[in-house]
Image (spheres, rainbow, N blue to C red):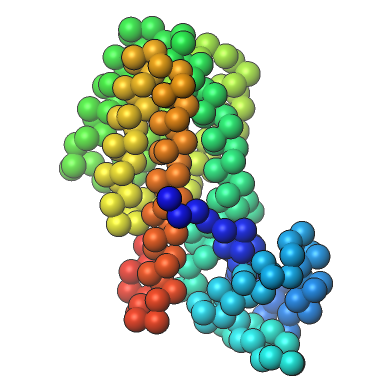
């Protein structure tokens, strides 16, 4: 499965700074070496990130002269799909894999029949195609919250409560990606089956596949957005 690269994350962070007004149109960015040091990456990664933003129309690279802000258009896509508040999506994924992977495995060991039935009920409600995206996302959050609750670990539940608002906000940013809602539902079904069958290893693996599927959809969309034939009409809401 294709993965997000470090340069994608750096591009999103730099775009985020530009759109917040740290650099105005026409402003010259610091030298590549200084930017690489600022973001804690190698110069080749920084160069690739700058190239991504040049392709999106946000930057103008004049070789031998410098890198300049060409636009602050909100049509740029990197930060919309790779940032939530001031955090990058790879950062959010890392936390969710560690937190929810362990939660799913623990829930598979400790879940009660009543809790399993509750998870299945959430799945049944989420399958209703008449639900709008907001209602689907609310059920998505309820499912993940219920899995964490099934661990019977109050500290784990408290930590998840701190991450959940970011997860919900980000879900709204990506839900309109092509096929994302159906893929999310299928991933949820796989997770619930593994937990209900009391298979901790499978439950942890199902969470990982669920999150990697989001990453795949983002990579696919960004790839289409960067295509020379793209008109920008496919940008999700």
From the viewer's perspective, is residue 190 above or below residue 66?
Answer: above
**Nearer to me, 55 or 139:** 55
Residue at coordinates 67% horizontally, 85% vertically from top-left? Answer: 68
84 on left or right of 183:
right
Number of residue marks? 0
Task: Determine the residue positioned at 33% across, 69% down.
Answer: 234
Residue 123: give x, y in percent of width and height: 27, 28
The quarter in which the C terminus is drawn is: bottom left
Image x and y of residue 8, in percent: 57, 62
Q: Which one is nearer the viewer's eye here, 164 or 213? A: 213
Q: Is residue 183 visible?
A: yes
Quarter where residue 184 is shown: top left
Q: What residue is drawn where x is 64% and y is 82%? A: 69
- Residue 72: tell me if it is visible: no
**172 relative to 113 in the view: left or right:** right
Query: Residue 147, position in %: x, y?
Result: 44, 22
Q: In the drawing, does residue 83 fall left or right of residue 116?
A: right
Q: Quadrant of residue 177?
A: bottom left
Front-most of residues 212 and 21: 212
What residue is at 51 percent from the left and 79 percent from the top? 55
**Picture coordinates of residue 116 (x, y %)?**
33, 14
């Amino acid at each position: 499965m294709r993965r997000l690269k470090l340069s994608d994350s750096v591009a999103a962070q730099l775009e985020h700074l530009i759109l917040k007004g740290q650099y105005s149109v026409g402003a010259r960015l610091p030298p590549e070496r200084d930017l690489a040091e600022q973001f804690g990456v190698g110069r080749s990664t920084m160069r690739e990130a700058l190239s991504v933003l040049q392709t999106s129309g946000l930057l103008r690279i004049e070789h031998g002269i410098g890198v300049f802000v060409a636009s602050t258009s909100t049509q740029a896509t990197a930060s919309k799909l790779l940032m939530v508040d001031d955090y990058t999506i790879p950062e959010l994924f890392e936390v969710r894999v560690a937190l929810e992977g362990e939660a799913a495995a623990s829930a598979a060991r400790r879940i009660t029949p009543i809790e399993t039935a509750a998870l299945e009920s959430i799945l049944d409600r989420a399958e209703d195609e008449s639900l709008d995206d907001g209602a689907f996302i609310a059920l998505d959050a309820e499912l993940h919250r219920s899995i964490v609750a099934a661990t019977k670990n109050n500290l784990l539940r408290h930590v998840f409560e701190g991450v959940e608002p970011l997860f919900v906000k980000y879900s709204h940013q990506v839900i309109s990606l092509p096929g994302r809602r159906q893929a999310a539902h299928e991933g949820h079904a796989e997770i619930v089956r593994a937990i209900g069958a009391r298979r901790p290893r499978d439950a942890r693996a199902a969470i990982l596949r669920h999150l990697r599927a989001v990453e795949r959809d983002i990579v696919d969309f960004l790839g289409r957005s960067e295509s020379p034939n793209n008109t920008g009409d496919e940008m999700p809401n």
